[in-house]
């Protein structure tokens, strides 16, 4: 376990440049829920993480759905839910609800209930739902730890990049979600399932640094900073807890709990063991590609593919049957 690293110092300075002193000061609040909310309470945050790269997004689609142009929502609806009607979905930690809104465009749904603690993001989601006249979707501001799960009610419980923010995964997944799902209900996840608090192993940090060296220096200049990314040090536990007390609090238990309590219908690993570490703060160089940058990304993809052949994937998409 690392208490503090050089990456913590760089990350703090980067956040100061991106979001200002009030954001940094918000991380000193004694209330952990308010610290968590502050991490997500702005729209259109300017950053350079792996998810902003179109070619990375196409890689996810390819590894999850088999087609770089097919998003997983369309894949799920056409392959697994096309004949189902009047579906009721519960989404926990929905954020801005971009994926839930896409599901709501299908008339298979009678109800999509989104629950989150962040009213700023929900206000934007409500606006989009109203403009598109998506009447099946609803929004509820609530801490899920106080939410009373209705028994045997939902056809689907859905998590997109939110399940790793919840503690006591065994109880949540193995008890509460099982009870609220119908007997043939489905749990659908698209999640980080790696190390708690991002406390990566030495071999994962070593492999990330080896992959980083595949990128020429000119493309390693950090976003909004006049310094270069020469090494990945990982996150210290102190910053993880201060920045967002919910971040990856029990993430390593997600897959064991799901596999113990549910039957796997479909599961796809899509890496993320190295690429988020390597591309953080330098991803902006690869949003628009030329031949050289596309070659670099392909090399990085191949390097990560070789790594996850020997190690469990940090990101998993899955559909699971309640049983």
Image: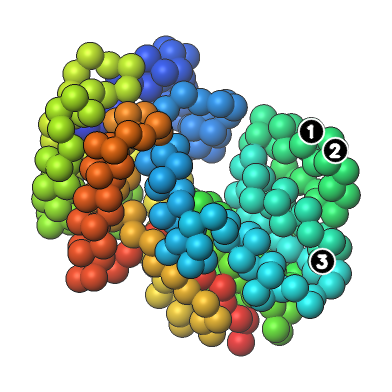
For this orientation, the residue located farthest to the front is 291
Q: Which residue lies most toward the bottom here? A: 323
Q: Residue at x 33, y 17 (%)?
A: 224
Near mark 3 (Cα within 10 A), the count class, few <14, some 14-19 or many ≥20, is some
Residue positioned 32% across, 29% down in the render? 285
Looking at the picture, how far across and down is residue 191, in whole percent?
A: 47, 58
Residue 173, position in %: x, y? Answer: 54, 70
- The image quadrant that residue 196 belongs to is bottom left
The answer to whether mark 1 and mark 2 are in CB contact below 8 A is yes
Q: Earlier in the sequence, mark 2 or mark 3?
A: 3
The number of numbered discs placed on residues in the rendered structure image is 3
Which of the marked residues, 3 or 1, is nearer the chain's N terminus? 3
Q: Secondary structure at mark 3?
A: loop
Residue 75, position as x, y percentages in the image: 61, 66
* Cα distance in 3D space between marks 1 and 2: 5 Å
Q: Which residue is mark 2?
A: 130
Left/right of residue 251 with respect to residue 279 in the rendered view: right
Q: How is the image coloured?
A: rainbow
Q: Nearer the viewer, residue 80 or 137?
A: 80
| C-beta proximity under 8 Å, tags 3 and 1 | no
Q: Residue at x 19, y 25 (%)?
A: 218
Q: Secondary structure at mark 1?
A: helix
| CA–CA distance in space, label 3 to label 1 | 22 Å
Return the residue at label 3.
108
CA separation in Å, label 2 and label 3: 18 Å
Residue 272, labelled with which disc?
none
User: Which residue carries the number 1 mark?
Assistant: 127
Residue 171: percent from the left, percent from the top? Answer: 53, 69
Q: Is residue 271 visible?
A: yes
Secondary structure at badge 2 equals helix
């Amino acid at each position: 376990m690392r208490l503090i690293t050089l990456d913590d110092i760089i990350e703090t300075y980067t956040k100061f440049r991106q979001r200002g002193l009030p954001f940094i000061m918000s991380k000193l609040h004694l209330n952990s829920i308010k610290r968590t909310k502050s991490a997500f309470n702005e729209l259109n945050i300017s950053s350079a993480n792996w998810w902003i790269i179109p070619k990375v997004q196409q890689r996810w689609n390819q590894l999850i759905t088999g087609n770089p142009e097919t998003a997983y929502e369309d894949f799920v609806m056409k392959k697994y839910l096309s004949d189902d009607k009047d579906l009721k979905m519960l989404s926990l930690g929905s954020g801005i609800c971009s994926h839930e809104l896409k599901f709501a465009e299908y008339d298979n749904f009678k109800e999509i209930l989104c629950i989150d603690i962040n009213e700023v993001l929900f206000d934007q989601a409500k606006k989009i739902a109203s403009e598109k006249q998506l009447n099946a979707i609803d929004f509820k501001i609530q801490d899920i730890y106080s939410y009373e799960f209705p028994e045997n009610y939902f056809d689907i419980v859905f998590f997109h990049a939110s399940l790793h923010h919840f503690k006591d995964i065994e109880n949540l997944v193995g008890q509460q979600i099982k009870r609220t799902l119908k007997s043939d209900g489905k749990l659908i996840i698209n999640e980080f399932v790696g190390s708690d608090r991002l406390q990566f192993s030495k071999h994962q940090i070593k492999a990330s640094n080896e992959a980083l060296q595949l990128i020429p220096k000119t493309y390693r200049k950090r976003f909004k900073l006049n310094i270069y990314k020469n090494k990945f040090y990982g996150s210290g536990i102190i910053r993880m807890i201060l920045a967002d007390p919910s971040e990856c609090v029990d993430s390593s238990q997600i897959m064991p709990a799901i596999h113990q309590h549910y039957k796997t219908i479909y599961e796809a690993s899509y890496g993320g063991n190295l690429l988020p570490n390597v591309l953080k703060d330098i991803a902006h160089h690869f949003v628009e590609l030329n031949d050289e940058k596309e070659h670099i990304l392909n090399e990085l993809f191949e390097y990560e593919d070789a790594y996850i052949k020997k190690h469990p994937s940090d990101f998993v998409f899955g559909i699971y049957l309640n049983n």
